[in-house]
Image (cartoon, grey):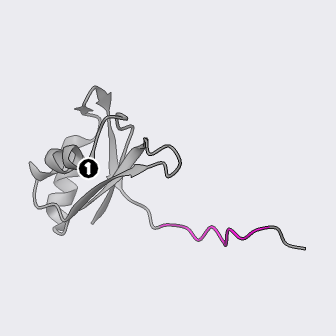
C-alpha cells in the first residue's frame, strides 16, 4: 500500500520517515518529496508498505502523532491524476 504522509518538518529525511513506519511493519520505501529548484523538503512524503494490514495499522497509529515537532497527517495515498502535458507555448 502506498501511504501519504503530510505536514512533515522540513528537516525530516527519508530515513526518519522509514524509521517511524518500521515500528509497524516492513517498509519497502520511504521518500520525502523535495523541491527540485531549492532542494528543500516540500513537507510531505510517501511510504510503501507491502502488507495491507500492517499499512492500515501504521496509518491508524501514526495519524495525528508528533514527528520531529510536527503533527503529521497519514492516510492512504490517492492515485496520481493525469495533469496533462507540460509543453511550452502553443501557437
Query: Left of 34 or right of it: where is 31?
Result: left
Q: In the displayed orientation, state which residue is furthest to the right.
A: 91
Majority SS type along the magenta span? loop
Q: Is residue 75 left or right of residue 20?
A: right
* Position above or below: 91 against 12: below
Q: How many marks?
A: 1
Which range of residues does the magenta coloring cover? 80-88
Residue pointed to by mark 1: 14
**Who's the residue at 39% across and 37% down the image?**
7
Quadrant position of residue 86:
bottom right
Q: Nearer the viewer, residue 2 or 54?
A: 2
Q: How far across and down, in percent of the image, does residue 25 sit?
A: 10, 57
**x, y (%) of residue 81?**
55, 67
Q: What residue is at 43 percent from the left and 62 percent from the top?
A: 78
Near-viewer residue (35 or 73)? 35
At 23% from the left and 62% from the top, the residue drawn is 29
Amino acid at each position: 500500500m502506498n501511504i501519504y504522509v503530510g505536514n512533515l518538518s522540513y528537516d525530516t529525511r527519508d530515513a526518519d520517515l522509514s524509521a517511524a513506519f518500521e515500528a509497524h511493519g516492513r517498509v519497502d520505501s520511504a521518500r520525502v518529496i523535495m523541491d527540485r529548484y531549492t532542494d528543500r523538503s516540500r513537507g510531505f512524503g510517501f511510504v510503501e508498505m507491502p502488507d495491507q494490514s500492517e499499512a492500515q495499522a501504521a496509518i491508524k497509529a501514526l495519524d495525528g502523532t508528533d514527528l520531529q515537532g510536527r503533527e503529521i497527517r497519514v492516510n492512504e495515498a490517492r492515485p496520481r491524476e493525469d495533469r496533462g502535458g507540460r509543453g511550452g507555448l502553443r501557437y
